[in-house]
Image: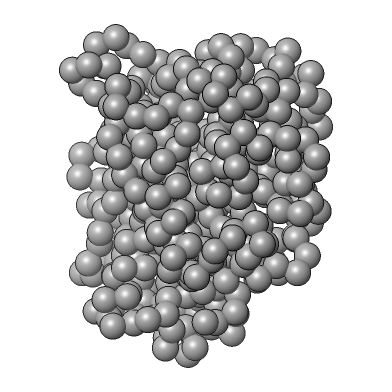
Amino acid sequence: MNKEVAIIGVGWSGFHPSTPEVSYKELMYAAAVRAYADAGVDPRRDIESFVTVAEDFIEGTSIFDEYVPDQLGAALKSVHTITGDGLHGLATAYMLIRTGVFDVVAVEGHSKASNIQTLDSIVGHAQDPVLNRPLRLNTHFVAGLEMQRYLHDSGSSLEQCAAVVVKNRHNALKNPLASYSANLTAEDVMQGPPLAWPLGRLETATPVDGSVVIVLASGRKAAELSDNPVWIAGMGWCNGSASLESREWSTLPYVEKAAQMAYRQAGIGDPWDEVDFAEIDDTYAYKELQSLEALGICAFGEAGELLMQGAFDPYGEFPVNASGGSLGVGHLLDATGLHRALEAVLQLRGEAGAHQIEDVHTGLVQSWRGVPTTSAAVAIFDNQEG
């Protein structure tokens, strides 16, 4: 059994609203080549297993994992397909290595959102086929309902949700991967185009095309292959029902449970004091506030006020989404969790460039599968072994 697992290589490609010049296979290949070069590995010789995160509905292709091996150099190797967010794929690779059966595993996720003409209709198939789907509830409509309930119960305000957009899109100005960087005011956001009241279009992450590949290794292999590994100190996940009738609407117990699992493994008692930064879900602006509270960074109803005080700014007490998050960079569909992991790795290696946070050693990454799921994953990364 392998006790320690590290990330030894990361690669990415795309990160644009539209990439008509390449196929999703070319995006995957470019990201894989970059990750393998970063890790110093040959996929045919060194990588023993591969994980891909994909959803056949999104891909438009049945049994999508058949289209993965060629781009990843995974021919005649085991490939695990996870129909979940990228962090769920990372958790799968982590467990594969912890078993001791594998020492080096690669994880791939991608988005070719620009190929999808009816994305809202497709993701609507995730709703309960008996109770919800016949009502033809738009995905953003469901998010608007949740936002309204959260604001009502927590006492958070529309201005605080707008401030999330202002922060993240301003942070994105320093990130070359960001497609939606901007200098906005809260008034700009609140007076922007409506989407599903009280949710506005500017408070909703816009999809982009891109691919992320991450290479993981056991502690022994990481010591052999990498001079700058990022260690996985803890991973947690929780997957609940997609039913709209049997859930909490103002709180996120699935995020809380995933976080508690990761904190136990990492030995973290107080994330505010023991974590240096976070890259977390902001698919919708209000979700960043909800997630901060579910992660135990602050109490229920406190995230908005702390945000307004500057606590979550890149130079604040607890930097959140210094990359710009999904609101600033763009939403990579199933690869979104891997994008957040990528950003955390770059921060911990001191390679985040203009948006580098000073003196960081421990990072928190969290993802959400999206409407209508109650599905989340949390990872704790550290640049110091043990």
Give the percent coordinates (x, y) of residue 241. Answer: 27, 35
Which residue does the image show at 55% across and 49% down from the upper left?
A: 296
Q: Where is residue 74 in the image (x, y as percent from the top left)?
A: 29, 66
The answer to whether residue 302 is visible is yes
In the image, residue 181 sits, relative to residue 356, either above or below, namely above
Q: Residue at x 65, y 57 (%)?
A: 272
Work out whether residue 18 can be spotted. Answer: no
Q: Nearer the viewer, residue 376 or 168?
A: 376
Which image quarter holds the N terminus?
Answer: bottom left
- The residue shown at (79%, 18%) is 187
Image quadrant in which you'd find residue 28 = bottom left
Reply above or below: 188 against 28.
above
Q: Nearer the viewer, residue 321 or 177?
A: 321
Question: Total of numbered circles in the picture?
Answer: 0
Q: Where is residue 153 in the image (x, y as percent from the top left)?
A: 54, 24
Q: Residue 65: x percent and y percent?
A: 25, 51
Q: Quadrant of residue 156?
A: top right
> Image height check: is 169 above or below 315?
above
Q: In screen coordinates, is 167 left or right of 153?
A: right
Q: Which colour scheme is used?
A: one colour
Residue drawn at (25%, 46%) of the image? 64
Residue 276 sits above or below residue 376 on the image? below
